[in-house]
Amino acid sequence: MLQETFVHIPGVGYRTEERLWRSGIRRWDDVVSRRMPPRIGPRLGKRIETELERSMEALHRGRHRYFARTLPAREHWRAWADFRDHVAFLDIETTGLSLGRDAVTVVGVFDGHRERSFVKGDNLEDLPHALARAKLLVTFNGARFDVPFLRKAFPRMALDQIHLDVMGPLRRLGFFGGLKAIEQDLGIHRSEETAGLSGFDAVGLWRAHRAGHAEALDLLLQYNMEDVVNLEPLAAFAYDGLRSLCLDGGFVTADRLSPVRHARERLMTAADSRTPTESARPAGRRAEGRPPGHSAA
């Protein structure tokens, strides 16, 4: 979808982008072989050609910061297919909801292959290094919650990735509510140990851990990692759905949004094929980076 995108160019909005698509300019390469639509003046046409040269060079070199800067924030989902090999699915837990008073306690990161947990007082300071190579950050409500907390906790961490906050795209597809509610709507299942737990329970688990209850941290890490790994099918679903709406139904506006056909069946199949050990951190498994013999209490 990124190479079919034009709204990152100054002066090109959704209607102009749709006009380009309808004229046969569906991808960046088409600009070379096709004429610009009559309603696009020569000045804008030249700007489109110039900016697309920069875009192709940036994509070829994997320069994610160019797209993080030029793409409208609500359109960062368009970069999913091109940058998913350098993704970091991320979710945080905190001591509460106040950015001014509360602190980050746990951060879970998943790159599509490797699960990593970072814990306050243990290895949380290793998080910036773990995210250094990520080009695409995927969260749920991260723009309003996770990222501000991380910026406060790590003022020197760049956090300059393309940011796919799946909450926005999912709402554009007609799915509202919190992460757990949307997971249920799409048939994504959680483990028996964490079913029914919420962010408020996560705060309580951290307090129990600090009070010396050894199993509380293991359950908290498992709960957090399920939040993280479940972002992968949600991101794929959001990308497929919005891409279909954009290219098959024109530019996306609130009155034209509806869930994509067969999405539930596709996600249910993917969720059913995932074993509990693949989708969640098993109880008792230590966070990566914790020295052998280190107590969870």
Image (cartoon, rainbow, N blue to C red):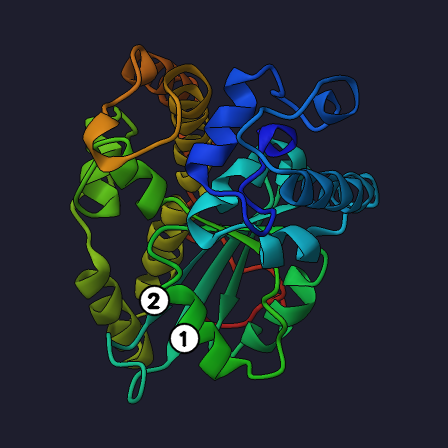
Residue at disc 1, secondary structure: helix
Residue 55, position in %: x, y?
73, 43
* Residue neighbourhood size for the residue with mark 1, other residues' Cα within 10 Å, grouped as few (<14), some (14–19), many (≥20): many
Residue 108, position in %: x, y?
48, 57
- Look at label 2 and name its amino acid: Phe
| In the image: residue 108, left or right of residue 297 | right
Quadrant housing residue 275:
top left
Residue closer to the observer: 142 or 271: 142
Residue at disc 2, secondary structure: loop
Residue 261, position in %: x, y?
29, 12
Dot 2 and dot 1 residues touching (CB under 8 Å):
yes
Mark linked to residue 120 = none
Q: Which residue is drawn at 36% across and 81% down?
A: 103
- Quadrant position of the N terminus in the picture: top right
Q: In this view of the protein, can residue 242 be seen by the observer?
A: yes
Q: Which residue is drawn at 46% across and 25% down?
A: 243
Check disc 1 and report the residue beneath it. Answer: 149
Residue closer to the observer: 84 or 118: 84
Above/below status of 2 relative to 262: below
Q: Which residue is drawn at 78% across and 38% down?
A: 56
Residue 87, position in %: x, y?
61, 45
Residue placed furthest toward the bottom: 101
| In the image: residue 220, left or right of residue 65 | left
Check disc 2 and report the residue beneath it. Answer: 145
Above/below status of 207 relative to 173: below
